[in-house]
Amino acid sequence: RVDNNLHRIVLLKDEIGRFYYPQGRFCNIPYWDLTRGYFVKALSAVEVEWTGEPVEPYADVPLHRGWNIAAYYPFYNLSAAAPGFDVISTIIDNVLIAKNAEGRFIWPLRGFSNMPPWTPGQGYLVKAANDVVLNYPYPAQRFNSLPGEAPLAETAHFRFTSRTGDFLPVLVLGLEVAGRQAEEGDEIGVFDGDTLCIGGGVWTGEMPLGFAAWRDDETTPAIDGYRNSRNITFRFWDRSENEEIRPNGTRTAGADLQNDGSIWAGDLTFDGPVSRPEIPKEFKLGPIFPNPFNSNTIIGYALPVASDVNLSLFDLNGRKVADIYRGFCEPGSYRLPYNAVKIPSGIYVLKMATAEYISTTKLEILR
């Protein structure tokens, strides 16, 4: 809790629809079940400590058929990498899919995982085929080498809001781009309809390629993810030519995929219209809209050349309060969604810095 009027927890949910909403002074979760995990949306970074007798790392974690939020008991990391899926090896035949909060997932049926090792203090979404009891392996069963720990490459062209609370896993099993060969560093973007980018992945030259399509966070006024998975479409970006390619005609790439409500998986074919984004003639910060804003805004910026970009937020005393974005961007115009729910009301200075350009503008957060 920040003070009597401001709680660090925005919303806490369990897996069956019960929730705790401090602002509304409401809670219908009867007690904290140590066998379960919970969704927690926090206003700012916070650490929580429990006291009492520790739970044994290998204690029973009962899972029901369907979606569960599984508590993670061990005080050590366990590998989630294929082909062994060490962390869920005791129930592997009953796991349909498992997800973390960062957009990573495990799909045992396809022998796929891009998830790093499971770590103490986290909970994980697990969809089970049947009622089953999960027991995490003993420390002696741990792998010394934990593959799959490398961070996923961030997209430089397709921009989207991540960590919205839930996501639809996308698994590309095959990729065909008419008239060209996909190269390392090219990107696949996933969209809600035709305008809102909700996720993307960087082509590494290896199949399958997995990434997240982020769902809308309904606790914010802005639409920052998809609301209906049937509206999902895809685009391909050729990095060397700086061109976007879509599927042919009115057929969307999503029509080639199998959607069972839990995951998109299949082949993608891009053989339609090609567009080349217009290259700006000069650097620019803005427009920012809306401004003033409550929690969500869109930050626009333009780059005439490929650049390492740093977007930061400062208070009027010159203290940095947030790193909004830091990364490499190709030439082009960008619209970056920004959620300022962790930032108190007030007037701030937004700074954009590259090797060749520095600019500032004011933002106002009103609540």
Image (cartoon, helix red, strand yellow):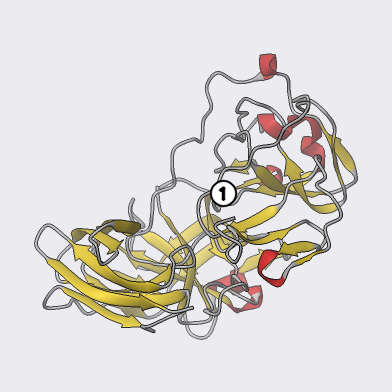
The answer to which quarter of the image holds residue 339 is bottom left
Q: Nearer the viewer, residue 307 or 1?
A: 1
Outermost residue toward the top in this view? 140
Circle 1 crowding by C-alpha within 10 Å: few under 14, some 14–19, many from 20? some
The answer to which quarter of the image holds residue 120 is top right
The residue drawn where x is 23% and y is 60% is 318
- Establish if 237 lies above or below 119: below
- Establish if 364 lies above or below 7: below
Measuring from the top left, give residue 303's x and y in whole percent: 19, 70
Quick one: SS at disc 1? loop
The residue drawn where x is 29% and y is 64% is 315
The answer to which quarter of the image holds residue 246 is bottom left
Measuring from the top left, give residue 249's x and y in whole percent: 48, 85
- Whether residue 326 appears in this view of the structure is no
The residue drawn where x is 59% and y is 42% is 113
Type of the residue with mark 1: Arg
Q: Nearer the viewer, residue 97 or 57?
A: 57
The residue drawn where x is 50% and y is 48% is 207
Which of the image's four quarters has the N terminus? bottom right
Q: Nearer the viewer, residue 313 or 214?
A: 313
Is residue 157 toward the left or the right of residue 257 in the image?
left
Measuring from the top left, give residue 366's x and y in whole percent: 44, 79
Is residue 289 toward the left or the right of residue 234 in the image?
left
Identify residue for label 1: 104
- Whether residue 360 appears in this view of the structure is yes
Q: Nearer the viewer, residue 240 or 189?
A: 189
Measuring from the top left, give residue 205's x and y in whole percent: 40, 47
